Amino acid sequence: MIVGIIGAGAWGTGLAHVVARGGSNVILWSFDGEYTKFDSASLPNTVKITRDMADLRDCDIWLAVTPAAFFRETMVRAGEFYKSQPIIICTKGAEPKTGKFMTEVLRETIKKVKNIGVLAGPQFAAEVARGVPTGTTLAGNKKVQEFGDVVFRNLHLSRTHDIIGTEICGIGKNAVSLISGYVKVRGEGENQSAMVMTVAWNEVVRLGVELGAKMPTFLDYCGLGDLLLTATSQTSRNFSAGMALARGERPKGTVEGISALDALVKKAKITGVHVPVLKKMKNRFSK
């Protein structure tokens, strides 16, 4: 199988390692020809790096791993070479300008796509690259699941048809991780940190259920698993960004949690779900 991976950041490159170890050939698209290099793992020789979107044309499946802020423009470009492959979205985030989820953006940019999947779970890219046991949730229809069994054979897969729930979990954990990092610095102790994280996550769950998500999804790898990983560890970009913002510093790298908060609050306003903690923190980070 030939797997096209769109995005060569840490997570895209980490997935390239996983897919190649599973026996598939990989075409890893990078906008500048560069990719993330991990000290603990060398990129397999079955991974081809390219800057040419046309190289994705004959792949059997695409994994979309570009940052949420660039997802739309990247998929518009990729759409010129799309030939009905299943597309699994591996980006956890929401579009900053519109608050739309990645599945919404994908359907707007590649209108003929039918088989959409979402991959989410507790996954630090460097550990995935070196083969550390990792659980992840794959949401999608039967065809997506069949492809996933081949592509992600080196991951511990949990399967579901709950695409919206899996996507909400990925967005929600970014937001809650950012909040948790902020409270870690500005709060009054561990008790308060646990309280705020619990309340904020409950707001994410209520919103998700209102949007059609299934409750068990929030207890899966993509939900509780990812929350425990990223809302308690300084290795998490969003948790570290929250700490930096609390200290009045500029966060390093991409901070998906800010746009995630904005998207969740927008969805809550539309659906009438009460999310006071998410709204309060969104306003604080928007200043």
Image (cartoon, rainbow, N blue to C red):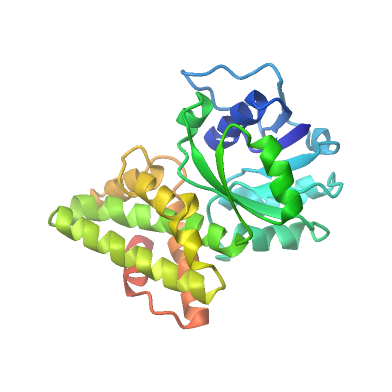
| Residue found at x 40% / y 42% | 237
In the image: residue 194, left or right of residue 63: left
Percent of width and height locating residue 120: 54, 49
In the image: residue 179, left or right of residue 49: left
On screen, 261 above or below 157?
A: below
Percent of width and height locating residue 51: 73, 31
On screen, 10 above or below 47?
A: below
In the image: residue 90, left or right of residue 59: left
Nearer-the-camera pick, 188 or 98: 188
Nearer-the-camera pick, 33 or 121: 121
Residue 29 visible in image: yes
Q: Which image quadrant is residue 279 in? A: bottom left
Percent of width and height locating residue 97: 56, 62
Q: How many marks?
A: 0
Nearer-the-camera pick, 199 or 29: 199
In the image: residue 24, left or right of residue 8: right
Q: Quadrant of the C terminus?
A: bottom left
Nearer-the-camera pick, 263 or 112: 112
Q: Which image quadrant is residue 14 in? A: top right
Residue 282 visible in image: no
On screen, 208 above or below 161?
A: below
Q: Quadrant of the N terminus?
A: top right
- Farthest residue to the bottom: give it: 272
| Residue found at x 67% / y 53% | 117
